[in-house]
Image (spheres, rainbow, N blue to C red):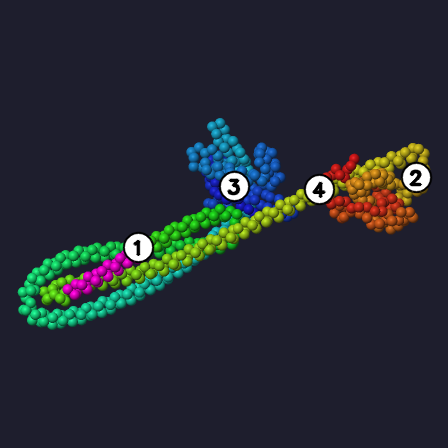
């Protein structure tokens, strides 16, 4: 016995008892279709009323097809048994929709003959209210559950609760395991990043100390050189003092102009440095957003894998889940498009950063050229130009800082390119999984089509077998009628012989002797069965092309041969006629045409004495053909008259 649950929901009900006020109650209605295949395949509708707050509240109703016919005639229903469950569910849903209104149109009433629900039968009425009167669409009588049924119901409830608890515990364990894994992974990544930060700090400090030592040595060397040059210049200064005064004034003016230009360039460089810092911050923010999206994509991949495992266990629900899966595929395609757009955006940002990098390198090269020119001019100048040298050193320090920042930017861009490559690989994996899902769905649809074709072929074979059974039953009924007519003819012959003063002798079984026909060349008594055979033989000679008469003759002769065999086994005597020995051959139809059926008409008209007699055998035909097995042969082909 298989049960299919089609409705399980809490419904508001108005409880009415004898001599009590009406009160409201939430009752859970459970509707199931019970299919029973032993001994006969039939379907029953089981309805159960329970209360979530009261575990001992249980009312049952089982409606079979016979009970539904009586219910249909009593209450004037217009639907069949197959459509009744859905119509009943529609009425219950309308009652649920109308429950929050002040004056609901549809109500559910639970009417009891007793003042309280104390193990007494109740009737559930679906009532439609209008300004004129209350119309009851349906009234079902429920019986209270016995102690065994209540125990069984409580055991099922406890089993369901335990299963829910087990499922929740498993989900909790899985979530805890996932969270611990994520926590360990994040802690490992944090420790690795902290180690990398420490390494970078150590490298940076060593690099800065090396640079300061190098610059200090260069400064001391340049000071010594400047002192040596100063002594030389002082010796030459006295000689070229007058010439240098004029040149000095011109050079001062040129240096002042160059200083102003350098200040402007310095301002531009500082502005560009601030802009570079801002772009680095924006890139970091984008990087964090991309990492968040990557984590979301991982979670989605995990959920997809879980759905794949559940899909293998839920093969019977695939027809219902096809639409949901198609919507899921559309959402995933949209997400993939969004991720592709994000990848293109990040590529554009990378291109922009590379362009900025090229521009900065060009600007650094130009600045180095300017610095070399300034160094050549400073060496040619006197000790009064030391201030300009200090400014140039400051500019060199700024350039070195800019170069270090450029190196950091290069490392960041390389890391971003690696992350982009990993994301593209993940996207390709997700697309492959989606394609595999689509292929599995197509295979299952093809299997469903094959099963439908097999079902149609079996239905056609069933219809053909039903038609064959009908034709066989018609043939048997026609033979019964012919046998009854033969018996009537026999009775008429016997009555005519007694009234005409003919000689009547009794057979060994107490039957009168058959009349002889000397004119036809037959000297022994003839039976009415022989007359019936003679009736069939002229028709056979006239209509040799009609297979229906041959098949009827064969079936009739096989019945007689089987009856003769039974009579031989009972009496134990075997007498044979000298003529027509070849007529005693074993001829007949298949066993399926001679089986007894409940709705078939029995053979009437032959008494046991006539059937057991041995002298019927010589008059049976020697050769016969079996009945045709064509499924589409109509019954009229067997009845030419």
Measured Cα–Cα span from mark 3 to mark 4: 62 Å
- Going by the image, does 458 lie left or right of 231? right
Disc number lying in front (1 or 3): 1
Measured Cα–Cα span from mark 2 to mark 4: 42 Å
User: Within 10 angstroms of label 1, few (less than 14), some, or many (20 or more) residues?
Assistant: few
What kind of element bears circle 1?
Answer: helix
Task: Identify residue for label 1.
Answer: 352
Question: Vertically, is 303 above or below 631?
Answer: below
Question: Vertically, is 482 above or below 283?
Answer: above
User: Within 10 angstroms of label 3, few (less than 14), some, or many (20 or more) residues?
Assistant: few
- Going by the image, does 393 lie left or right of 451? left
First of labels 1, 2 by sequence position: 1
Disc number lying in front (3 or 4): 4
First of labels 1, 3 by sequence position: 3
Task: State which region is magenta.
Answer: 353-377
Front in this rendered view, residue 365 or 454? 365
Q: Position of residue 292 (x, y in %)?
A: 35, 55
Task: Identify residue for label 2.
Answer: 520
Task: Identify residue for label 4.
Answer: 632
Discs 3, 2 touching: Cβ within 8 Å: no
Measured Cα–Cα span from mark 1 to mark 3: 83 Å
Name the residue located 82 percent from the left edge and 41 percent from the top edge: 544
Q: Which mark is residue 118?
A: 3
């Amino acid at each position: 016995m298989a049960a299919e649950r089609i409705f399980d929901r809490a419904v508001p009900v108005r409880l009415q008892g004898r001599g009590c006020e009406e009160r409201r109650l939430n009752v859970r209605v459970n509707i199931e279709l019970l299919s029973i295949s032993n001994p006969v395949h039939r379907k029953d509708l089981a309805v159960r009323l329970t209360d979530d707050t009261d575990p001992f509240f249980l009312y049952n109703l089982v409606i079979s097809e016979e009970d539904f016919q009586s219910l249909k005639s009593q209450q004037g229903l217009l639907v069949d048994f197959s459509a009744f469950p859905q119509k009943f569910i529609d009425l219950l849903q309308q009652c649920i929709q109308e429950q929050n209104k002040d004056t609901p149109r549809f109500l559910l009433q639970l009417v009891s003959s007793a003042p309280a629900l104390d193990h007494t039968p109740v009737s559930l009425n679906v009532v439609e209210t209008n300004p004129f009167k209350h119309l009851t669409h349906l009234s079902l009588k429920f019986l209270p559950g016995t102690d065994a049924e209540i125990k069984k119901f409580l055991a099922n409830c406890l089993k369901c609760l335990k299963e829910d608890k087990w499922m929740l515990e498993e989900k909790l364990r899985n979530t805890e395991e996932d969270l611990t894994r994520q926590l360990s992974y994040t802690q490992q990544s944090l420790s690795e990043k902290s180690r990398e930060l420490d390494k970078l700090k150590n490298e940076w400090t060593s690099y800065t100390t090396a640079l300061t030592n190098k610059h200090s040595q260069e400064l001391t060397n340049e000071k010594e050189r400047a002192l040596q040059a100063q002594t030389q210049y002082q010796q030459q200064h006295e000689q070229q003092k007058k010439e240098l005064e004029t040149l000095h004034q011109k050079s001062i003016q040129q240096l002042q102009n160059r200083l102003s230009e350098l200040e402007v360039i310095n301002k531009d460089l500082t502005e560009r440095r601030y802009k570079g810092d801002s772009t680095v911050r924006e890139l970091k923010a984008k990087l964090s957003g991309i990492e968040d999206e990557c984590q979301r994509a991982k979670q989605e991949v995990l959920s997809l894998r879980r759905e794949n495992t559940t899909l293998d266990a839920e093969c019977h629900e695939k027809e219902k889940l096809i639409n949901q899966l198609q919507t899921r595929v559309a959402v995933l395609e949209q997400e993939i498009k969004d991720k592709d757009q994000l990848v293109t955006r990040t590529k554009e940002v990378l291109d922009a950063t590379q362009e900025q990098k090229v521009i900065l390198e060009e600007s650094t090269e130009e600045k180095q050229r300017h610095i070399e020119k300034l160094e050549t001019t400073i060496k040619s100048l006197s000790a009064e130009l030391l201030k300009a040298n200090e400014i140039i050193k400051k500019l060199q320090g700024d350039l070195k800082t800019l170069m270090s920042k450029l190196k950091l930017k290069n490392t960041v861009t390389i890391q971003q390119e690696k992350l982009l490559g990993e994301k593209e690989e993940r996207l390709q994996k997700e697309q492959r999984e989606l394609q595999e899902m689509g292929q599995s769905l197509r295979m299952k649809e093809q299997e469903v089509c094959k099963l439908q074709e097999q079902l149609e072929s079996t239905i056609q074979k069933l219809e053909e077998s039903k038609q064959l059974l009908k034709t066989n039953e018609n043939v048997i009924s026609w033979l019964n009628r012919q046998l009854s007519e033969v018996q009537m003819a026999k009775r008429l012959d016997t009555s005519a012989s007694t009234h005409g003063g003919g000689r009547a002798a009794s057979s060994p079984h107490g039957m009168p002797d058959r009349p002889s026909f000397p004119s036809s060349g037959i000297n022994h008594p003839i039976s009415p069965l022989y007359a019936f055979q003679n009736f069939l033989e002229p028709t056979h000679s006239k209509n040799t092309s009609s297979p229906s008469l041959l098949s009827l003759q064969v079936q009739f002769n096989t019945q007689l041969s089987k009856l003769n065999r039974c009579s031989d086994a009972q009496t134990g005597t075997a007498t044979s006629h000298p003529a027509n020995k070849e007529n005693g051959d074993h001829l007949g139809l298949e066993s399926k045409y001679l089986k007894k059926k409940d709705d078939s008409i029995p053979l009437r008209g032959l008494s046991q004495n006539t059937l057991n007699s041995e002298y019927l055998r010589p008059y049976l035909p020697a050769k016969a053909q079996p009945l045709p097995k064509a499924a589409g042969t109509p019954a009229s082909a067997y009845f030419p008259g």
